[in-house]
Image (spheres, grey):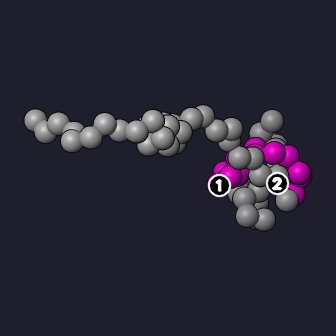
Amino acid sequence: MASPKRRTSKHKQKLRRGANRWRKPLLKTCPECGTSIPGHIACPACGTYRERQVLDGDLV
């Protein structure tokens, strides 16, 4: 098996490990009712997605 020619520097290690850190999810506001929801899903409060009604009634 191949072994590395040079040691990985501390800076390179930190750059690589920094990509694995936890980030809070980005929440969008629904244009119809104003509630905070994650992107690319229908709003559970009013049932709209991209200004179209896709769900029946209130789910909450």
What's the residue type where badge 1 is placed? His
- Tag 1: Cα neighbours inside 10 Å, few (<14), some, or many (≥20)? few
Badge 2 element: loop
Please indicate, yes or no, whether residue 57 appears anywhere in the rendered image: no
Asked whether 31 or 17 is in front, the reply is 17
Q: Residue furthest left?
A: 1
Q: Is residue 21 left or right of residue 4?
A: right
The tag earlier along the polypeptide, 1 or 2, is 2
Asked whether 29 or 23 is in front, the reply is 23
| Label 1 sits on residue | 40
Question: Residue 19 location in percent, x, y?
Answer: 52, 42
| Label 2 sits on residue | 30
Q: Which residues are magenta?
A: 32-44
Q: CA distance from mark 1 to mark 2?
A: 11 Å
Asked whether 48 or 40 is in front, the reply is 40
23 within the magenta span: no
